[in-house]
Image (cartoon, helix red, strand yellow):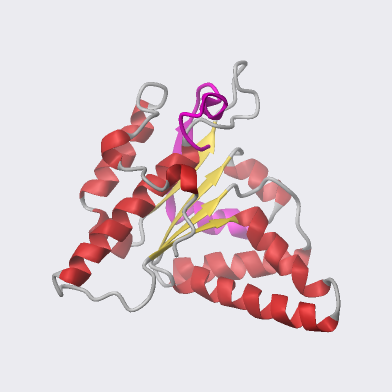
């Protein structure tokens, strides 16, 4: 239901695989998970991004998505325990994972094909958008990997702005620093991200080639 990638479905803070290459990132994730319900309730998020080097010029596969999903998994477990103990009941899914390119594709599908397909795509898109706005913890994976129309940028900004305004925690992953994302998307978007997250850098070789973890 949370749409967590299969490769990250069992990621937990007890088994973080990027500690050697990214010790500060590992510490940040573990500390966040120690008091995860409070951190999420306070709207504290992360911006996980790559620092490319000669061994990995694109900055892929160094653990950003794994880190984000680790937090998401831990939060869902924490909220499930709270629900079972009748401390804080779960009315809707508490956490959700969205690949931003797929969100953009869902938006674009509204304008393609026969009218009935467009209408169905529109319903699907707006259900997804509403979920992204209201879910307690949202992971937005791989932002800034491609350009977008002004119309989509406005939609994307609306999601982020609403979450920030309501104090909802969001974790972003990207292969780019926010300065580059601002060029591809919109400075309004990156300003809201910057003001609501802690930036954490990732470096090291592409571990996906060895099957160790997701990007």
| Highlighted magenta segment, given as a residue range | 187-215
**Which residue: 45% across, 71% down?**
165
Front residue of 159/14: it is: 14
Front residue of 214/190: it is: 214
Q: Residue 197 in magenta?
A: yes
**Which residue: 63% across, 65% down?**
156
**Which residue: 61% across, 65% down?**
157
Residue 154: give x, y in percent of width and height. 68, 68
Q: Quadrant of residue 25?
A: top left
Residue 51: give x, y in percent of width and height. 55, 28
- Quarter of the image where the N terminus is located: bottom left
Residue 123 position (above or below residue 153): below
Residue 205: give x, y in percent of width and height. 53, 21
Front residue of 114/168: it is: 114
**Which residue: 35% across, 27% down?**
19
Decide if residue 110 is in sight here. yes
Q: Residue 15 in magenta?
A: no
Residue 141: give x, y in percent of width and height. 55, 50
Residue 89 position (above or below residue 178): below
Decide if residue 187 is in sight here. no
Front residue of 81/21: it is: 81
Q: Quadrant of residue 54?
A: top right
């Amino acid at each position: 239901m949370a749409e967590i990638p299969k490769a990250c479905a069992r990621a937990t803070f007890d088994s973080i695989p990027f500690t050697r290459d990214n010790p500060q990132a590992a510490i940040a994730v573990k500390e966040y998970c120690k008091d995860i319900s409070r951190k999420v309730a306070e709207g504290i998020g992360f911006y996980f991004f790559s620092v490319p080097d000669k061994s990995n010029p694109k900055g892929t596969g160094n653990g950003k998505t794994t880190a984000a999903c680790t937090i998401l998994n831990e939060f869902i477990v924490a909220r499930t325990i709270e629900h079972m103990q009748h401390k804080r009941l779960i009315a809707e899914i508490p956490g959700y994972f969205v690949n931003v390119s797929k969100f953009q594709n869902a938006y674009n599908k509204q304008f393609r094909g026969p009218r009935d397909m467009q209408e169905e795509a529109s319903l699907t898109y707006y259900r997804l958008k509403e979920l992204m706005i209201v879910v307690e913890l949202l992971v937005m994976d791989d932002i800034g990997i491609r350009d977008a129309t002004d119309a989509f940028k406005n939609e994307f900004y609306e999601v982020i702005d609403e979450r920030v305004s309501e104090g909802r925690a969001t974790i972003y992953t990207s292969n780019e620093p926010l300065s580059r994302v601002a060029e591809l998307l919109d400075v309004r978007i990156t300003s809201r991200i910057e003001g609501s997250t802690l930036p954490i850098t990732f470096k090291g070789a592409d571990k996906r080639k060895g099957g160790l973890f997701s990007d």
